[in-house]
Amino acid sequence: MPQEFKLILKHADEPGYTPDMGCYLKHGGYETLKKALQAPGRDLPDGKKLSPQEALREDVKASGLRGRGGAGFSAGLKWSFVDRRSGKPIYLICNADESEPGTFKDRQILHKDPHQLIEGMVLSCWANDVKLAYIYIRGEFPEGARLLNRALAEARAKGFLGKNILGTGYDLDIWVHRGAGAYICGEETGLIESLEGKRAYPRIKPPYFPAILGLYLCPTIVNNVETLCHVKHIAAMGPAEFARLGTPNNTGTRIVSLSGDVQRPGYFEVEVGKVTIGELIFHENFGRGLRPGRQLKAVIPGGSSSKVLKAGEVFQLKRKGADGQMAPVEVPMLDLPYDFDSLQSAGTMSGSGAVIVMDDSRSMVDALANLSEFYAHESCGQCTPCREGALWMAKGLHRLTHGDGRKEDAAYLAHIAQNIQGRTICAFGEAAAWPVLSFVKKFREEFEARGEADVAARAAAGSVPDSNRKPSPHA
Amino acid sequence: MSAPATAAPATSPPPLPAAETVTLKVNGRTVQVPKTMPDWQGKPQPTTMLQAARLGGVEIPHYCYHDKLPVAGNCRMCLVEFGTPALDPATRKPALNADGTPKIARSVLPYEPGTPRGAIACATPISPGMEIYADSPATKQMREAVLESLLINHPLDCPICDQAGECKLQEYSVEHGQSASGFFETKVHKPKAVDLGPRIMLDDERCILCTRCIRFSKDIAGDDALGIVNRGSYNSIAAFPGRQFDNNYSLNTVDLCPVGALTSKDFRFKMRVWFLKETRSLCTSCGTGCNIVIGSREETLYRLEPRENEAVNSSWMCDSGRLNYKWIGRADRLREVRVRGGHSTWSAALPQIQAILAKAPQGSVAILAGARQTTEELYLLKKLADRFGAVTDSVPRTGAADGFLVAADRNCNTQGARLTGIWSGTMGAQIPRIAEGIRAGGVRTLVVFGEDVTRHGIGPELLASLETLVVSDLLPSATTRAAHYLLPGCAAAEKRGTFVNVKGRLQKFLKAVEAPGDARPEMEFLWDLLEGDVARRAPANIEAIFNQMVREVPAFAGLEWARVGDTGVTVPL
């Protein structure tokens, strides 16, 4: 039976669990850190010896942990890119700028169990010789920032943070930095610029790969809140045990934010790939189905930037057959396992783990207009295709949803989006383009019908298309 | 060691080690380029696709990129499709085609392998075997799309835009754009005629947000005055609140602006740029000698712009120098030859001066030559002085150096005056001696070029006691009013010549406009004075005079007018 597996959220929602040091310690908090800092290192079969820090880095790599922020990149590999010979300090930044529409998982950790994040961060910093780390928290989480600052003060008082941590001679401090309300600050290089006190313009890569030229042009690691919490569990369980959770190449658990037209929206921590999209929506343990009398229309599987999935879609996936060979199999959309690789094979992504469910009461045109407004508002405007294209798409959709549409608007929108994706400084270009490309492609008839209806209505009113165009809110 | 330290090397120095190179293809042509090239600060960095293509003879269009500014990578105009040698997945060795040539993997979107992926040529380093497709259909489509995006919210007010005719948005639209746009929405409106500072106007609607102005001001001029406000398509350039964009280099941003967003208050709405004649010249406002281009039409100067010279001013000039040209067209410019207060002519006045000078006893003539005269003029003045054993000197003129381009020496040819022998030791030290000579009666004739000596210790009462006062200048002064012979000269923009800057760079400038009235280049009438019989003299010729000067002034040994070039040569000071 598909069910939750609570690793990170093991205690967070227990009655009486509080975000303070006392409660965390009662539940075994910071024991992993104490143990890790006393670990002797590791002898390898070839006679080489790993320092305890190197051993933890190897463990994170061996665990198969993939980043929980959106891109799903191997956390261990990301750490391995860090330039450790530059002679410059290495920084670690916790990306707590959770802003992807539909996503509300990191805030559970920040608000309910901040010490778990701090323990994960101290371990990650120790493993990477980081002496100074930051938590970049979105400005809309004032309570989270307050709780984090309190927790950091408690940790300093207890010797888990600050000078000479637990008597080991290791120094680390962590500071909270609050964002000022811009989605682009979640992009790691935009975040770094913002942290440096500048406008959050993402940096060009090359040359500004954070692992080499990050914060203050020093090697920098940027990890998501959930990812850093997992480091604590990898250190506690060992990589093999961690990798037994989830499915191969999609290890561990992740917190899914389920929203939209389901009976029980909420967040659910599941083993990656052990639950399907259909189960997330319909199963008693998760969404408990749609509202009465409604049919499923579409699912946005990984935050608003991911490409939409249409009810009834069937995908060709490669699966290992009984003979051990990879063979193509047909998988209906609802049977897609909720993991990184399956959703990628289905042409979309699990992104930030936010599943947005839409039933047949929803207009895809209106929904896309809403999303595009968001991206037009949040485009930082640094590079041309996204700056101009994001607003262009939003204006076109505003027109289409306000009685001034045309049949060709579907193709028109796709044309704009196609000229954004892959041509921008950061992945925001894809984030803005993919909803448009996928909505228009998979629900083309709905877009064209809307345009045709507008044309017909204008003809009946005796007006020509251009003359009755409603003023755009952006004009 | 037996060889004396001063001995000339018996053999030529060993050849420099060959720079590491990378071989790649640009539009199908194999080119070999250095592995590293200087960045905007001159530091060697991995060669970029844009630099490599340029070396291969292919210019990749760009807006935000500028050789002299940090790379921003924001305009996306330089996106190009490219390929890199494919690796055989099994052997990890380069994969080969059937004909043995390396197989090239074209760049594609990782999530959409059928779609080409461009890289920004301005910031992407090259690699061995890379192929740059600067004119492939995919590259052209990317350019068209960027141009379309830049134009959808652009006001397209070219008919009244000062940049029209030298606008990269116009030029690239012609070269790389598409003739039609599907844009069906209302344009974004932004602030117009924004008063950024005392010399700059900004039209935010025309701005393509390339940030060249921001980067120049912050990283070159050292004045972090400009930034971007608002977000997304509403992004606008602005001066920080409470700040004026008023540093002495602000007008360089007008040159850098690829569109008509930043305009010079001095130049805007004055002249269509395609009517301007461009003349290579030099700024005369200080001893740096910034290389400039004069924009003129029908004997009127409209603007000065910096001209690139790595040895002097890079690509920049200061605002004070740039705007210091209005006086050239002043109504009170000296335009006629005057003898003892009355109108005269060159043919009447010059023989009279010659006659006076011919009778002057040795030591009775003094010459004060402004260090803003050309090197050739100063050379001729020195020759004249030598004939009569005349004392010569110049007037020092100093201010604060700004650590960038403005030099403390506010004369443009102090070194030329020194090298030609007009002054030596301490500039201006002879002036009190000349004044004393006039007072004592030993100095009876004073020749003054380009200075108002009444402001430098030779007052009107002293001038009145002279037998002969010959003055050449451009504008009226107490000295010109006291002159017995007044010879109207030319501004640098009205003649040809050379200046030697504070670092010993000898540079030439060309004539942009005609001088007003009867004014003549000083070199010409000095030549006439020296040559004696006006009827039989050879006409003054800049090349001949320069080449003659080179033979007589040791610092200029070996130079030739024709070989000075557009950016000058360095001479020993």
Image (tube, grey):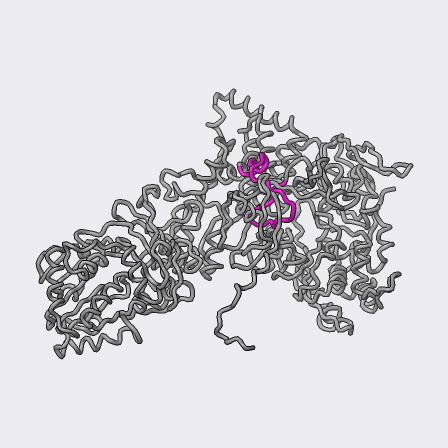
| Magenta segment | B117-143
Residue B302 place in picture, x, y as percent: 30, 49
Left or right of A137 on screen, residue B326: left
Is B139 covered by the magenta stretch?
yes
Is residue B505 in view?
Answer: yes
Left or right of A332 on screen, residue B292: left
Front residue of A430/B573: it is: B573
Is A111 covered by the magenta stretch?
no
Front residue of A442/B379: it is: B379
Residue B258 place in picture, x, y as percent: 45, 46
Left or right of B308 on screen, residue B278: left
**Relative height, residue B154 to residue A19 (above, below):** above
Looking at the rendering, which quadrant does residue A292 occupy?
top right
The residue located at (18%, 60%) in the rendering is B531
Q: How many marks are shown on the rendered structure?
A: 0
Q: Residue furthest right?
A: A323
Residue B337 place in picture, x, y as percent: 14, 57
The residue located at (72%, 37%) in the rendering is A347
**Relative height, residue A263 to residue A456 (above, below):** below
The residue located at (60%, 49%) in the rendering is B124
Looking at the rendering, which quadrant does residue B523 occupy?
bottom left
Is residue A422 in view?
Answer: no
* Quadrant (top left, top right, bottom left, bottom right) of the N terminus of chain A: top right
Left or right of B82 on screen, residue A246: right
Front residue of B84/B477: it is: B84
Residue A472 place in picture, x, y as percent: 50, 36
